């Protein structure tokens, strides 16, 4: 609460500083109503272009029930995938200059996290989410620098489920399907022991992601259920060698689709469901704790409190750049979940994560 007050007081200053590297940026995306869903009591209203979001409490219509939030960006539900990617392109590209970047999607199940990060099932290029677009863009830029800087790109894909890290690219079938691609070791491995595949084109990436997504559903009763209770992390490792000087740079990009943030009613769940809920709760709150500790320049940053924060350590804090997509459901029934999502987002928005590396 104390920190929150300071944040609010310094809101203006933080907004001015938001472009600084080392900060966490928060982009808010509201899912549109889905076909057949109708548009009952819309509770999340999009206002203006200046990063303001107005939320109406469905049980308290009128001025009393209004809450305003301010983020680096607020998208209209009509915003398309290309538009969203345009805004994060510079961030993605900085990986090729040796920065560590972390982009994650936070929100309750069904709010569009996977849509933003991956895209809808069987997405055409137009519907591609951040993951495909980012890799595609990295290849494009690295091609254009070829001869001056030669890049190698490797991809890992893991899932964290009940505090266990599972390699989504490890089984034999993936090796077979990849044919010419083989595992490689490279400096700066963020996920020890998880297989890493060198990728040379967007179609390599599509092949890998398909395998990863398939593996994600193995052993799950229903894929949607399982995927909403695990975090999935795609890590892109970049190694660039300057052909003139021979110097080598490393950058990595973490693309994270977090587990659903909805609170589970503890009186109603037992056994596996309760255990899952506790693990999700723990890792999401650890993520928040790490961000606040970085912000308050604490001498101890509690990275080790969860697998999620351990894995993302190189991309949270220091010279890393972090972006959070806050995803919201538009319907009235999600009001209280939306508010708790927004409060989490408000706490982390504008936070300065560490010293900036001078820009190139
Ligand atoms: P989550 O990953 O948060 O559980 P999903 O990404 O699976 O949510 O989204 C839930 C449903 O809404 C999916 O059918 C998805 O295709 C659809 N959806 C989400 N965001 C959008 C959007 N911006 N435009 C169109 N459909 C969307």
Image (spheres, helix red, strand yellow):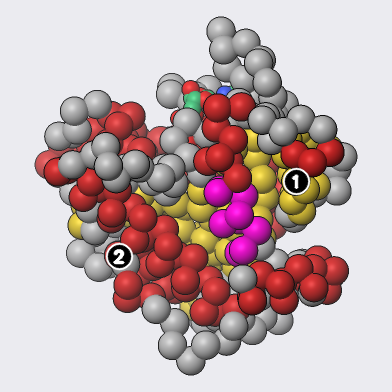
Q: Indicate which disc, 2 or 1, sits on the residue closer to the N terminus.
A: 1
Q: Quadrant of residue 198?
A: bottom left
Task: Please tell me which residue is depicted at 42% across the width and 73% down the height of the picture.
Answer: 313
**Nearer the camera: disc 2 or disc 1:** 1
As drawn, the residue found furthest toward the top would be: 36
Quadrant containing the C terminus in the rendered view: bottom right
Task: Please tell me which residue is depicted at 32% across the width and 67% down the height of the picture.
Answer: 306
Evaluate whether residue 330 shows in this view: yes
Which element is circle 1 on? strand
- Asked whether 305 falls inside the magenta stretch, the response is no
In the shown orientation, is residue 155 left or right of residue 108?
left
Camera-side residue of 141 and 42? 42
- Asked whether 344 falls inside the magenta stretch, the response is yes
Task: Please tell me which residue is depicted at 47% across the width and 71% down the height of the picture.
Answer: 289
Q: Quadrant of residue 98?
A: bottom right
- As drawn, the label of residue 307 is 2
Q: What is the magenta range?
A: 340-348
Task: Tell me: residue 30, above or below residue 320.
Answer: above
In the shown orientation, is residue 244 left or right of residue 62?
left
Q: Report x, y in % for residue 256.
A: 45, 51
As drawn, the residue found furthest toward the bottom would be: 299
In the shown orientation, is residue 70 left or right of residue 149?
right
Disc 2 to disc 1, C-alpha distance? 34 Å
Task: Please tell me which residue is depicted at 66% across the width and 62% down the height of the picture.
Answer: 349
Quadrant containing the N terminus in the rendered view: bottom right
Q: Which residue is mark 1?
A: 67
Q: Report x, y in % for residue 66.
A: 77, 41
Evaluate whether residue 238 shows in this view: no
Q: Report x, y in % for residue 158.
A: 29, 52
Number of residues whose C-alpha sits closer than 10 Å to that of mark 1, classed few (under 14), some (14–19) or many (20 or more): few
Task: Tell me: residue 291, above or below residue 258.
Answer: below
Q: Report x, y in % for residue 117.
A: 51, 41
């Amino acid at each position: 609460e104390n920190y929150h007050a300071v944040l609010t007081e310094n809101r203006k200053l933080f907004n001015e500083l938001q472009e600084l590297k080392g900060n966490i940026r928060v982009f808010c995306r509201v899912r549109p109503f889905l076909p057949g869903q109708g548009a009952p009591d819309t509770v999340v209203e999009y206002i203006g272009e200046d990063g303001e979001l107005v939320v109406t409490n469905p049980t308290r219509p009128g001025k009393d029930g209004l809450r305003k939030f301010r983020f680096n960006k607020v998208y209209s539900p009509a915003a398309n995938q290309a538009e969203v990617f345009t805004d994060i392109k510079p961030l993605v590209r900085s990986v090729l200059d040796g920065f560590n970047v972390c982009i994650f999607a936070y929100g309750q199940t069904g709010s569009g996290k996977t849509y933003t990060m991956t895209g809808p099932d069987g997405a055409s290029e137009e519907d591609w989410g951040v993951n495909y677009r980012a890799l595609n863009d990295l290849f494009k830029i690295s091609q254009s620098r070829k001869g001056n800087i030669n890049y190698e790109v490797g991809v890992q894909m893991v899932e964290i489920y009940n505090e266990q890290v599972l390699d989504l690219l490890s089984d034999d079938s993936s090796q077979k399907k990849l044919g010419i691609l083989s595992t490689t070791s490279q400096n700066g491995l963020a996920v020890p022991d998880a297989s890493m595949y060198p990728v040379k084109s967007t179609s390599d990436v599509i092949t890998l992601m398909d395998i990863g997504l398939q593996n994600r559903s193995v052993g799950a009763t229903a894929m949607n259920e399982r995927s909403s209770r695990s975090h999935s992390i795609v890590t892109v490792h970049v190694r660039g060698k300057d052909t003139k000087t021979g110097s080598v740079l490393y950058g990595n990009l973490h693309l994270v689709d977090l587990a659903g943030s909805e609170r589970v009613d503890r009186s109603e769940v037992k056994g596996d469901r309760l255990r899952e809920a506790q693990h999700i709760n723990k890792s999401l709150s650890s993520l928040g704790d790490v961000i606040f500790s970085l912000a308050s320049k604490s001498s101890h940053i509690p990275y080790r409190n969860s697998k999620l924060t351990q894995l993302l350590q190189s991309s949270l804090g220091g010279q890393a750049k972090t972006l959070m997509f806050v995803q919201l459901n538009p319907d009235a029934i999600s009001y209280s979940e939306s508010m708790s999502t927004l409060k989490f987002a408000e706490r982390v928005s504008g936070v300065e994560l560490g010293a900036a590396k001078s820009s190139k």
